[in-house]
């Protein structure tokens, strides 16, 4: 007799909310259905989105949910930067008709996805091919911001995800170009965190600074347009900005690994996935190991990119499975 439980996995960001049915059994996710994506601007809030998802399924939804949100889950109200949604954690169960639910931060969910994903969902970037069986894995995910978490795997096969605010550590230039970039950015941002130099919007700062340093025309467009120009090679300044971004990400990932005492690193995030080919180039890997006396240690750390198509949904379901595992 199966002990599998059906749940609804939900991943709520500022722009989109994703829903999927999932099954969990003995601490593992055994099935994740195709997701339904709703623009947050098209519905009034979580309860309305839940109803729309329920209508799309044509049958009653499970009375259990794993919900990942882009915000601090300890807050009385979770407000989203890019939408009008407000989620009050205390009201979730009654509004959605749930008997059981788990609410976690969205990047904490990514940490659970890293812990539970099949090896086929990882691409090797640098260092040894194999993950150590236990120890600490640093997870860094460039997207709208820079998410950072630590995954601690224990010898008995269990694990714990520690969410952090590591993206807000200070940006440390590694060469004269980055010293000039920092000087330019400080004109508008007195304190420059690594997130400012290593997230989706960062390419604007990088492109503007590099254009001024090289005496070139500052490219027009927002961050999405500049990333498109960079990845298609249509604008040389955007290409240079992308190359510099990967170098900065490599340096930051190495710094975080040292701070966490990590023996493995995973790059995540929607932008990280888009940069798969760029991160396989020497700029990222050279900066990752460029730690002076600790270069030898860094060269022993495997670095991979998670390629799971829905890490937020899968990770939310994995977190619920772990929290409700027998024993």
Image (cartoon, rainbow, N blue to C red):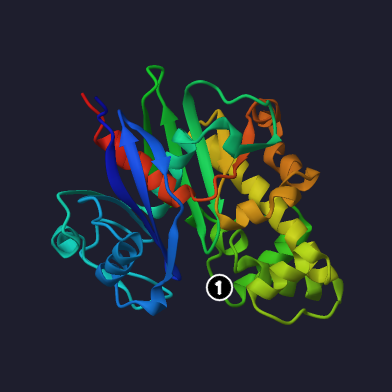
Q: Position of residue 59 (x, y in %)?
A: 27, 57
Element class at badge 1: loop
Placement of the C terminus among the 4 image quadrants: top left
Q: How many marks?
A: 1
Q: Position of residue 30 (x, y in %)?
A: 39, 35
Q: Is residue 133 left or right of residue 321?
A: right
Mark 1 lies on residue: 189
Image position of 162 with respect to 295: above or below: below
Identify the residue at horizontal 30%, vertical 28% (top origin): 26
Q: Position of residue 23 (x, y in %)?
A: 34, 40
**Does residue 172 show up?**
no
Identify the residue at horizontal 24%, vertical 35% (top origin): 324
Placement of the N terminus among the 4 image quadrants: top left
**Does residue 120 show up?**
yes
Q: 67 and 302: which one is in front?
A: 67
Identify the residue at horizontal 35%, vertical 64% (top origin): 56
- Picture quadrant of residue 200: bottom right
- Picture quadrant of residue 162: top left
Image position of 112 with respect to 12: above or below: above
Q: Is residue 191 left or right of residue 6?
A: right
Q: Position of residue 131 (x, y in %)?
A: 58, 26
């Amino acid at each position: 007799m199966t002990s599998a439980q059906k749940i609804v996995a939900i991943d709520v960001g500022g722009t989109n909310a994703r829903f999927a049915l999932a099954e969990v059994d003995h601490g593992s996710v055994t099935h994740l259905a195709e997701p339904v994506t709703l623009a947050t601007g098209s519905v009034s809030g979580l309860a309305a989105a839940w109803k729309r998802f329920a209508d799309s399924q044509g049958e009653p939804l499970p009375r259990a949910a794993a919900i990942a949100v882009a915000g601090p889950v300890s807050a009385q109200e979770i407000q989203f930067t890019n939408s009008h949604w407000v989620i009050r954690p205390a009201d979730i169960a009654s509004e959605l008709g749930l008997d059981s639910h788990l609410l976690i931060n969205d990047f904490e969910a990514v940490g659970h996805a890293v812990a539970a994903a099949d090896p086929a969902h990882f691409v090797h970037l640098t260092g040894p091919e194999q993950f150590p069986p236990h120890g600490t894995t640093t997870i860094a995910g460039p997207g709208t911001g820079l998410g950072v978490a630590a995954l601690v795997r224990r010898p008995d096969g269990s694990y714990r995800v520690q969410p952090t605010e590591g993206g807000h550590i200070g940006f440390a230039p590694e060469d004269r170009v980055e010293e000039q970039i920092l000087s330019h950015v400080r004109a508008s941002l007195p304190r420059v965190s690594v997130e400012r130099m290593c997230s989706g919007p960062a390419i604007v700062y990088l492109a503007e600074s590099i254009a001024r340093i090289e005496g070139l025309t500052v490219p027009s467009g927002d961050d999405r347009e500049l990333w498109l120009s960079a990845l298609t090679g249509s604008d040389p300044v955007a290409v240079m900005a992308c190359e510099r971004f990967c170098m900065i990400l490599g340096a930051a990932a190495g710094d975080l690994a040292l701070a966490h005492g990590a023996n493995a690193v995973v790059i995540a995030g929607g932008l990280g996935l888009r940069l798969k080919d760029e991160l396989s180039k020497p700029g990222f890997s050279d900066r990752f190991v460029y730690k002076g006396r600790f270069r030898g240690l860094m060269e022993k750390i495997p670095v991979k990119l998670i390629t799971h198509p829905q890490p937020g949904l899968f990770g939310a379901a994995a977190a619920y499975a772990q929290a409700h595992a027998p024993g």
